[in-house]
Image (tube, grey):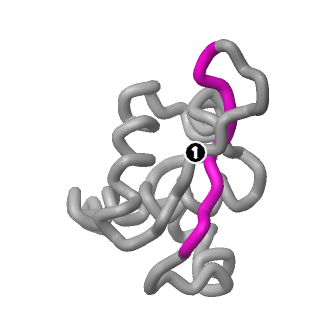
């Protein structure tokens, strides 16, 4: 079987990160731990969610002296979260994530 294209893996990575955020894995360190992604890849993926019309917002913790908080999906855009949950095994297998 051929390896998936970079376009497909990039798209799946964005979907998977959005799914993780919706499940409470909503900080860069937590995403890194769940996926094995390097910090920069996790940060770039969060930024790239807007390119597929998923609105992801950072909510800063009250009273935090440093930039602390978590991400939240405020709008899924054209993505159906139920479809995403059903297709999760395919996404994880394609991306070689645990």
Label 1: few (<14), some or many (≥20) within 10 Å? some
Q: Residue at x 22, y 57 (%)?
A: 6
Q: Position of residue 68 (x, y in %)?
A: 66, 25
Q: Is residue 37 above or below residue 17?
A: above
Task: Determine the residue positioned at 54% across, 70% down.
Answer: 90
Give the x, y percent position of residue 8: 29, 66
Give yes or no for residue 56 being in the magenta stretch: no
Q: State the residue at coordinates (22%, 63%).
A: 7
Q: Position of residue 96 (x, y in %)?
A: 49, 49
Residue 71 placement (x, y as % from top left): 62, 47
> What's the magenta region?
66-75
Q: Which residue is mark 1?
A: 58
Picture quarter containing residue 52?
bottom left
Q: Quadrant of residue 12?
A: bottom left
Left or right for 86, reference 50? right
The overriding secondary structure of the stretch rendered in magenta is strand
Q: Label 1's element?
A: strand
Residue under the point 55% across and 73% down: 75
- Residue sticking out furthest to the front: 63
Q: Is residue 64 above or below residue 9?
A: above
Quadrant the C terminus occupies: top right
| Viewer-proximal residue among 49 and 98 | 49
Q: Who is closer to the viewer here, 96 or 74? A: 74
**Which quadrant: the N terminus?**
bottom left
Count the labels in the image: 1
């Amino acid at each position: 079987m051929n390896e998936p294209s970079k376009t497909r893996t990039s798209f799946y990575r964005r979907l998977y990160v959005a799914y993780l955020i919706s499940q409470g894995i909503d900080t860069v360190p937590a995403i890194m731990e769940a996926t094995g992604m390097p910090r920069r890849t996790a940060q770039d993926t969060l930024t790239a969610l807007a390119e597929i019309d998923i609105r992801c917002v950072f909510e800063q913790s009250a009273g935090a002296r440093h930039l602390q908080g978590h991400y939240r999906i405020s709008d899924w855009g054209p993505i159906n979260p139920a479809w995403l949950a059903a297709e999760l095994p395919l996404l994880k297998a394609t991306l070689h994530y645990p």
